[in-house]
Amino acid sequence: MAAKDQVKALLFDVFGTVVDWRQSVIRELSAFGNARGLSVDWARFADEWRGLYQPAMEEVRAGRRAWTILDDLHRESLITLLERHGVKGLAAHEVEHLNRIWHRLDPWPDSVEGLIRLKRRYIIGTLSNGNTGLLVRMAKRALLPWDVILGAEAARAYKPMPECYQRNAALLNLEPQEVMLVAAHNDDLAAAQSVGYRTAFVLRPVEYGPGQTKDVAATRDWDVITDSFTGVADAMGCPRR
């Protein structure tokens, strides 16, 4: 029996793997800025916002601050960047509207089709650093057909801490080897593999824009290597009905 034949659930990294965070964020920031006559390089702003993502979570992972959901970390980073880029005078509801851009990200073109096929045979769900409310609202808007919303908040541990992968498998009453992580990020897959997960790499070559240099190829012989969720469905034996 091939290792992937033991898989009963596929859990998905979300930002960059399921949804195109960069173009979604740039689009909404640009629309907001244009409506208010703001002159800001919104592509740079989006990249800087994402750049503050890991350092903010590291404060929690390292125990230097108490558990804090990603919405709150995103808001703190947003306020920092608004000040850095000279955007002043926004009302609290406007800041919150911008922060909730992360709830409104668009899926990659193959995401929904592939998830629907996989759902016919497997449990499918998130394994994201996004908080539960964020992921639920994203799924409702983008028609992502999850069976379950899991991730850092459920585990009270941000990836790539091993507890995040272990506790979420346990919540499904599964052993780690019965779960496959699907991700566009080699480091996420490596962390999941280290605790026994099966792995699927999905190439998203423009997640970080046209000049992307990271995760442009699989760096290990993952169980599945493909460039789409429909490719994952093919590899996992899910028919094209």
Image (cartoon, rainbow, N blue to C red):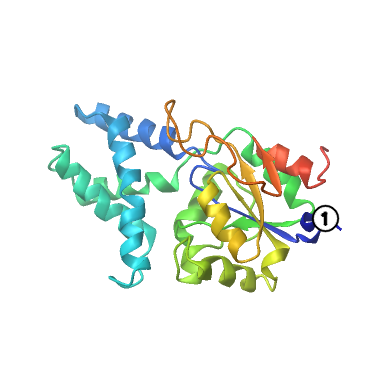
Tag count: 1
Outermost residue to the right: 1
In this orientation, which residue lies closer to the viewer: 86 or 3?
A: 3
Q: Whole-percent x and y of residue 135?
A: 50, 54
Look at 68% across and 45% down and name the residue there: 115
Q: From the image, which quarter does the N terminus lie in? A: bottom right
Residue 231: image quadrant is top right
Q: Whole-percent x and y of residue 211?
A: 42, 27
Vertical order, 171 against 234 (above or below): below
Secondary structure beneath label 1: loop
Q: From the image, which quarter does the C terminus lie in? A: top right
Q: Whole-percent x and y of residue 2?
A: 82, 55
Outermost residue to the front: 220
Q: Neighbour class for label 1 at 10 Å: few (<14), some, many (≥20)?
A: few
Is 139 situated left or right of 34 in this image? right
Vertical order, 63 against 36 (above or below): below
Q: Whole-percent x and y of residue 205?
A: 53, 32
Look at 45% across and 56% down and name the residue there: 130
Look at 13% across and 41% down and name the residue there: 88
Look at 49% across and 52% down and name the residue there: 137
Is 238 situated left or right of 152 in this image? right
Reading the image, the residue beneath label 1 is 2
Is 221 situated left or right of 234 in this image? left
Residue 31: image quadrant is top left
Vertical order, 61 against 105 (above or below): below
The amino acid on which the numbered mark 1 sits, given as a three-letter code, is Ala
